[in-house]
């Protein structure tokens, strides 16, 4: 058995590759940002070729940093930004247009049409998803309807489509394999999650030919080996999961009732609900967490569209900080927000509101409002949005949460993590290895090839870096939550 697992972590703003050892430690990593394209307000695109070139480049760079070769790698695990949609030519592997990113809102009118036709309840029943521009199926429809010749070519069987995992596997295998895993497929709004299959009725709602779609596989199995054009030794590709499901696995939330929150560009909270898909009356999503060894595990999910991205906006949009890490010091420079609330609905609101027409607002400003208060309000908005999701998650599942496991870049901000614990009223637990998205993909790949033998074995190696205990009184927390909801109400429907 080779000594390492490599995770390819293809995210919204960068491509990363991380080499893991058997104890879950990071041996080496490489990361490369790529361009974000905003051709119109509310539109967000990526260049699929740039996604692949950056991912392939950091893969090679990570191996070089670790001073290892392809022969030293037991398997590759893939995790990816979900819902982002790519359509390409089967013959050449060339994309027919830019990828439509998960944040993109151009398909809001398609959602309205689906609702007007009375399809909403049927879609929710089969997919566990709400009808929102977030999900991939409507992006596929938009491409077929708007890129010249795309629908004709799709119906002729000339095109393939997929989420980013499918695109990476296609390129890693030289076009030999067109697959996805069930966790990614469940985010397309085209899968009956109870059966784990593409659904003809859902495809008909969006007029999408089934020939476009990848084969659905489990999240942990030996799919194929890399093309000899990439490495002289074929490396097993053995794990795939959407980024948030991978993070749930990486946090070893393998028992029903365990919850994690990932703080990245957005915030994504998942609760393991075991082998039961929980229907949510509170506008959360029922989604597939993973399928391993023939068993499908489900999760409740709440997606916050703008999490850490609000800090990027403070840096790039307002210019009140020079780098993202500066936000904590600026926020600590004030004693409180003095009633200032910032709702970062830059791309609409996700769970539990699902309002594509909401827009960002700052309320409570006076002549005395400072940059420090805006920075603090921005950080608090991340935690408050996450609170709204967890509150409804508990109501839907009927399970009291003992702790929140956290990961992602923003967990380095102690001020944010302490406020999160305070506003939730439960401990917030941060592991030593916070790259849990990539780690989850590594675990899934490693289990498939015998690198690790069980989730129990994996759990024994998890080390905790810090546990944030709540110290704020519940009365104070509830007062903040009350005013936050007033601010949220004012942001809704603004762009309608």
Image (cartoon, grey):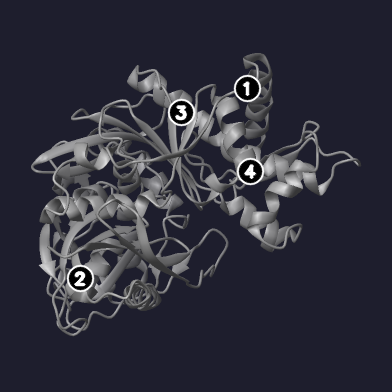
Mark 3 or 1 closer to N-term? Answer: 3
Q: Position of residue 358 (x, y in %)?
A: 58, 43
Q: Is residue 153 left or right of residue 461?
A: left
Q: Is residue 414 left or right of residue 148?
A: right
Q: Nearer the viewer, residue 292 or 280?
A: 292
**Circle 3 SS class:** helix
Pointer 2 and pointer 3: residues touching (CB < 8 Å)? no
Q: Position of residue 377 (x, y in %)?
A: 70, 40
Q: CA distance from mark 4 to mark 3?
A: 25 Å
User: Residue 288: which quarter of the image?
Assistant: top left
Mark 4 or 2 closer to N-term? Answer: 2
**Circle 2 SS class:** helix
Dot 1 crowding, Cα within 10 Å, few <14, some 14–19, many 20+ = some
Look at mark 2 in the image and give the residue it sits on.
72
Residue 153 in view here: no
**Circle 1 SS class:** loop
Dot 3 crowding, Cα within 10 Å, few <14, some 14–19, many 20+ = many
Q: CA distance from mark 4 to mark 2?
A: 54 Å
- Mark sitting on residue 471: 1
Dot 4 crowding, Cα within 10 Å, few <14, some 14–19, many 20+ = some
Q: Residue at x 29, y 27 (%)?
A: 279
Q: Residue at x 90, y 40 (%)?
A: 368
Look at mark 3 in the image and give the residue it sits on.
390
**Closer mark to the observer between disc 2 and disc 3:** 2
Mark 2 or 3 closer to N-term? Answer: 2
Mark 4 or 1 closer to N-term? Answer: 1
Q: Residue at x 62, y 32 (%)?
A: 419
**Closer mark to the observer between disc 4 and disc 3:** 3
């Amino acid at each position: 058995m080779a000594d390492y697992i490599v995770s390819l972590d293809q995210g919204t703003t960068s491509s990363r590759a991380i080499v893991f050892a058997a104890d879950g430690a990071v041996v080496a990593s490489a990361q490369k940002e790529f361009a974000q394209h905003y051709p119109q307000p509310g539109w967000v695109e990526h260049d699929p070729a740039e996604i692949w070139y950056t991912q392939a480049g950091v893969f090679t760079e990570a191996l070089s940093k670790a001073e290892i070769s392809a022969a030293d790698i037991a398997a590759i695990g893939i995790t990816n930004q979900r819902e982002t949609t790519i359509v390409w030519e089967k013959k050449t592997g060339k994309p027919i247009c830019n990828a439509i990113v998960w944040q993109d809102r151009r398909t809001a009118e398609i959602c309205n049409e689906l609702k007007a036709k009375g399809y909403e309840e049927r879609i929710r029943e089969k997919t566990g998803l709400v009808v929102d521009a977030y999900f991939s199926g409507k992006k596929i429809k938009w491409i077929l309807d708007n890129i010249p010749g795309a629908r004709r070519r799709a119906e002729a069987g000339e095109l393939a489509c997929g989420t980013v995992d499918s695109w990476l596997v296609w390129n890693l295998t030289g076009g030999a394999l067109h697959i996805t895993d069930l966790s990614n497929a469940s985010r397309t709004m085209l899968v009956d999650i109870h059966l784990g299959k593409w659904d003809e009725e859902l495809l008909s709602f969006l007029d999408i030919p089934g020939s476009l779609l990848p084969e659905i596989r489990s999240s942990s199995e030996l799919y194929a080996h890399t093309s000899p054009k990439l490495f002289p030794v074929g490396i097993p590709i053995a794990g795939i999961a959407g980024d948030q499901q991978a993070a749930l696995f990486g946090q070893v939330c393998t028992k029903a009732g365990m919850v994690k929150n990932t703080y990245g560009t957005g915030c994504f909270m998942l609760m393991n609900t075991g082998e039961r898909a929980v229907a949510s009356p509170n506008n959360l999503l029922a989604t597939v967490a993973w399928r391993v060894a023939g068993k499908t595990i489900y999760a409740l999910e709440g997606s916050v569209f703008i999490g850490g991205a609000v800090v990027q906006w403070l840096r790039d949009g307002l210019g009140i900080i020079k780098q993202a890490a500066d936000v904590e010091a600026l926020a600590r420079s004030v004693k409180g927000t003095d009633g200032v609330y910032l709702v970062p609905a830059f791309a609409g609101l996700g769970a539990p509101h699902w309002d594509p027409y909401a827009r960002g607002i700052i309320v409570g400003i006076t002549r005395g409002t400072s940059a420090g208060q805006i920075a603090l309000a921005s950080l608090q908005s991340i935690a408050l949005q996450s609170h709204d999701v967890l509150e409804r998650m508990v109501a839907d599942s009927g399970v009291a949460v003992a702790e929140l496991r956290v990961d992602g870049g923003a967990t380095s901000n102690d001020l944010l993590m302490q406020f999160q614990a305070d506003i939730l009223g439960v401990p917030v637990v941060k592991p030593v290895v916070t790259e849990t998205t990539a780690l989850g993909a590594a675990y899934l790949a490693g289990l498939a090839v015998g690198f690790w033998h069980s989730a129990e074995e994996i759990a024994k190696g998890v080390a905790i870096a810090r546990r944030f205990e709540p110290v704020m009184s519940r009365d104070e927390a509830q007062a903040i939550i009350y005013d936050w909801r007033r601010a949220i109400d004012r942001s809704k429907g603004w762009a309608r």
